[in-house]
Amino acid sequence: MGMNIEHSFAQSWWGKTNCNLKKDLFNIMPCESKINSSKGNRGMGIVTKVTNTNGATKVGSGANGFSLWEPADEWKGDFARGYMYIVTAYEDYANKWQSEGSNSLYNNTYPTLKEWAYKLYIKWAKADKPDALEIKRNNDVAKIQGNRNPYVDFPNLMEYVWGDSTNIAFNPETTVKSSSYVNGEGGGGGSIDPDPNPGTTEVNVYQATFTSNDGGCQESIVSNSSPYTQIWTRSAQYGWKGTAYKGSNYAAEATLTLPEVDLTGYDDAKLTINQAINFAKGKALDYLKVELKSVDTSDGTVEETQLTDFDVPSKDSWTYYDYTLDLSHFVGTKATISFRYKSDANICCTWEIKKATITGKKTATGIKETTTEPKDFIDFTKPYDVYSIDGRKLTPSLTNANSIVIIRQNSKVIKMRIR
């Protein structure tokens, strides 16, 4: 059995001109030679009348009358994400799509995919999530040609572009990532190191690196005798830092609160923080607390708790350590976590938190996209960055009309269309 190198988007779809799409590795897949010959320049869809098959790939026509080919179930998500990548990365080819490609593509920069196509590909991609093999291929291609397929990295990005979330801001910091899947196990297209317990899925419910952004956190000052207007401040070097010391010790109390997370549907959960504590003189646990407020979604019962397994380094230092706290008691609720800082004339320590991650684990057949989305707006009078949907940083000269862009300002991220 011979093998061919197959272009997912047939070369005739863009006039067979020599261009980056011809050599883009995300548009090239191996294919058994005989079935590849039968596929010709067909588009991808559901084949209802089969004229040829090799037991995996079907070739024929669909209910819409189009000549189509259909991949095996365990590869449908891989090819769907490949199609989404191409129409996104090559939106400047909008006026080139022709031949059989016109059955599924518009000659425009958005939505490019026709409604029947993007609805089908979203369905396939949700049923066949990125697995270890697809994630590894994405990593390997990135090493070779320097870019990634964001629809593999962020499996529900497609919903923000064509699906049920087009009016919601996409936040790459907090959305579900394929790297969060257990050993990369999402769909069934292949595996590198299969999970010995594939029924268990652990995902990031919340994740923030505070040296990069504020993570949606809010400070609340209970009392403050220091010269500072804020006890909790954030910097690119330390992340969030709580202190009331300025030349001498001052009494203060303030909380830093994470956004609410939804832990319903999970069997287990935990919080991991990367922290450093100094000047506590062995009394950090007397002054620093981690607290949680939970809301039972069934009856609205509110419970406020101090997490008693919170711990600190044995010695004062500027060294950061990871500490994990058990949240299993709060699964099935909506939870809000706060870091409470206290100081007085005797102890005025410094508490630095660089990262915080909340993970949830559940036994399920799929992954529920549970994310924390910021609801802040962008202040366009202040500096902000613009990125294309595939992650390229843009300048005004590179921002095309009628295109979708991601705008980021500190921790605030929104998606919008340029008209």
Image (cartoon, helix red, strand yellow):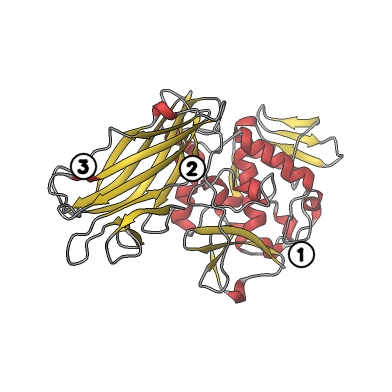
Disc 3 versus disc 1: nearer the observer: 3
Q: Say which amino acid is labelled 1.
A: Asn
Q: How crowded is mark 2: few (under 14 residues within 10 Å), some or many (20 or more)?
A: some
For disc 2, the marked residue is 260
Q: How crowded is mark 1: few (under 14 residues within 10 Å), some or many (20 or more)?
A: few
Front-most of residues 202 and 112? 202
Disc 3 versus disc 2: nearer the observer: 3
Q: Is residue 236 above or below residue 277?
A: below
Q: Say which amino acid is labelled 2.
A: Glu
Residue 74 relative to residue 53: left or right: left
Disc 1 versus disc 2: nearer the observer: 2
Front-most of residues 197 and 3? 197
Q: Say which amino acid is labelled 3.
A: Asp
First reached walking from the N terminus: tag 3 or tag 2: 2
For disc 3, the marked residue is 286
Front-most of residues 402 and 264? 264
- The quadrant of the rendering that contains the C terminus is bottom right
Front-most of residues 157 and 254? 254
SS label for mark 2: loop
Q: Where is residue 227 in the image (x, y as percent from the top left)?
A: 28, 67
Residue visible at 59% across and 49% down in the picture: 28
Name the disc covering residue 71, or none. none
Residue visible at 45% across and 49% down in the picture: 140
Residue 255 seen anywhere in this rendered image of the structure: yes
Residue 7 seen anywhere in this rendered image of the structure: no
For disc 1, the marked residue is 95
How far apart are the alpha carbons under marks 3 and 2? Answer: 26 Å
Q: Where is residue 144 in the image (x, y as percent from the top left)?
A: 46, 56
Residue 325 relative to residue 409: left or right: left
Q: Position of residue 281 (x, y in %)?
A: 12, 49
Residue 3 relative to residue 58: left or right: left
